[in-house]
C-alpha cells in the first residue's frame, strides 16, 4: 500500500483527479467504505489516497475550511466577484448575491470592477461608499490594458481563488493578463484527464503562483438554493451588529415593528441597495422552497 496526501483538482463522472504530494496527478475512485457515509467530494478538497493498485483510491477526506455548492469547490481563500463598470451595466443585486454566498460559506470576498475608464461619474465613489465600510475590498481595473491588477496579484499569490461574475464583465481578459497560459493549461488539464475539452459543468483547479485559480465556468448564473431562509440575513454582514436588538425573536427585518435593522436603514447606517437586495434574495429563497415542496 502506497498512501499519499493530495488535493482534488477536478471531478468528472465518478472519477477524481488528485494532485498528489509526489508531484503527480492521480486518477482516483472512492474506496468502498467511504461510500457508505453521506459525503460529497469537491474540487479543492484535501484527501488521502492509496496509489498501490491499478488505479488510485481516495481513502479519506480532510477537514475543509469552506464549501460552495454551485459551483462545487472547497477550501477557497478568496472569491473575486468581477463586474464591468459599464457595457454591460453592473447589477448591485448580483453583486450582493455573490457576496451573500461567500459570506454564508465563510469565504473572504472582494469586488473587482473592470472597465474603469467607462465608469459613470460618481460610480466609483458610490461603490466604495457601500462596500468598503463593510470590509469588502473594491478594486477598479482596466483588464484590457492590464491596469490596476497588482492588488489582485498580491491577494492571489499562494492562495486558492475563484473569479465569478456575469458574462461580458471581462473575467477572461483579466485572467489572461494575470497569466496568458491559463487558457492553455485549462486544455492541458483536460488532455491529461483524457476527457476532451473541459466541460462547463465542473470546477477545476489551475496552478498559479504557488496556489490555484479555480476555473468556474457559468459562475454568473447564481443559484441561491444552498441558502436556507434563516441564512438570508446571515449573508449581509452589516446586519450582524443588530442581532438580538429587534423586538421579536426571529425577526425577518421586513414588516415587524421595532426592527433594529430597519431602524439602522432609516438612519443611513445600512445602504438602501443592500437592504433591497436582501428582500429580493429572501423572496427568491422562499419561492424556491415553495417549488421544492410541490415537486
Image (cartoon, rainbow, N blue to C red):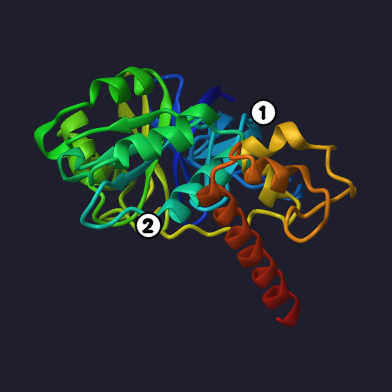
Element under disc 2: loop
Task: Look at 75% across and 36% down and name the residue there.
Answer: 242
Residue 63 bears which disc, if any? 1
The residue lying toward the viewer, choosing from 211 and 60, is 211
The residue lying toward the viewer, choosing from 111 and 89, is 89
Give the Cα distance between marks 2 and 1. Answer: 27 Å
Residue 155, percent across and down? 37, 21
Element under disc 1: loop
Image position of 135 (left or right of 63): left
Image position of 290 (left or right of 203): right
Task: Look at 48% across and 51% down and name the residue there.
Answer: 71
Residue 217 bears which disc, if any? none
Residue 218 bears which disc, if any? 2
Count how many numbered circles sit on residues in the image. 2
Q: Quadrant of residue 80?
A: top left
Residue 166, percent across and down? 34, 55
> In the picture shown, does residue 20 fall above or below 115?
above
Crowdedness near tag 2: few (<14), some (14–19) or many (≥20) residues, C-alpha within 10 Å: some
Q: Quadrant of the N terminus?
A: top right
Residue 95, percent across and down? 44, 48
Task: Look at 69% across and 43% down and name the residue there.
Answer: 234
Q: Quadrant of residue 45?
A: top right
Image position of 119 (left or right of 35): left
The residue lying toward the viewer, choosing from 142 and 217, is 142
Confirm whether residue 153 shows in the render.
yes
Q: Quadrant of the C terminus?
A: bottom right
Crowdedness near tag 1: few (<14), some (14–19) or many (≥20) residues, C-alpha within 10 Å: few
Q: Nearer the viewer, mark 2 or mark 1?
A: 2
Task: Look at 63% across and 45% down and name the residue there.
Answer: 265
View extreme (left): residue: 145
Q: Earlier in the sequence, mark 2 or mark 1?
A: 1
Residue 7, percent across and down? 49, 30
Amino acid at each position: 500500500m502506497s498512501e499519499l496526501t493530495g488535493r482534488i483538482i477536478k471531478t468528472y463522472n465518478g472519477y477524481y483527479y488528485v494532485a498528489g504530494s509526489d508531484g503527480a496527478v492521480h486518477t482516483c475512485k472512492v474506496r468502498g467504505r467511504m461510500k457508505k457515509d453521506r459525503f460529497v467530494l469537491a474540487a479543492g478538497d484535501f484527501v488521502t489516497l492509496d496509489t498501490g493498485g491499478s488505479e488510485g483510491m481516495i481513502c479519506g477526506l480532510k477537514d475543509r475550511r469552506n464549501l460552495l455548492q454551485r459551483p462545487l469547490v472547497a477550501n477557497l481563500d478568496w472569491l473575486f466577484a468581477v463586474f464591468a463598470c459599464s457595457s454591460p451595466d453592473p447589477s448591485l443585486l448580483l453583486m450582493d448575491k455573490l457576496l451573500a454566498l461567500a459570506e454564508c460559506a465563510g469565504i473572504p470576498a472582494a469586488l473587482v470592477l473592470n472597465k474603469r475608464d467607462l465608469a459613470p461619474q460618481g460610480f466609483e465613489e458610490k461603490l466604495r461608499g457601500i462596500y468598503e465600510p463593510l470590509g469588502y475590498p473594491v478594486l477598479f481595473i482596466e483588464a484590457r490594458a492590464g491596469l490596476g491588477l497588482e492588488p489582485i496579484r498580491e491577494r492571489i499569490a499562494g492562495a486558492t481563488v475563484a473569479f465569478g461574475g456575469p458574462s461580458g464583465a471581462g473575467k477572461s481578459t483579466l485572467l489572461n493578463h494575470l497569466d496568458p497560459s491559463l487558457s492553455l493549461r485549462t486544455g492541458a488539464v483536460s488532455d491529461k484527464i483524457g476527457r476532451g475539452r473541459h466541460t462547463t459543468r465542473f470546477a477545476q483547479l489551475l496552478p498559479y503562483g504557488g496556489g490555484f485559480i479555480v476555473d468556474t465556468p457559468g459562475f454568473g448564473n447564481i443559484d441561491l438554493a444552498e441558502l436556507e431562509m434563516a441564512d438570508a440575513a446571515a449573508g449581509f454582514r452589516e446586519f450582524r451588529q443588530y442581532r438580538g436588538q429587534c423586538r421579536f425573536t426571529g425577526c425577518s427585518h421586513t414588516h415587524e415593528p421595532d426592527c433594529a435593522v430597519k431602524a439602522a436603514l432609516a438612519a443611513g447606517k445600512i445602504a438602501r441597495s443592500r437592504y433591497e437586495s436582501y428582500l429580493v434574495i429572501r423572496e427568491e429563497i422562499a419561492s424556491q422552497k415553495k417549488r421544492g415542496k410541490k415537486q
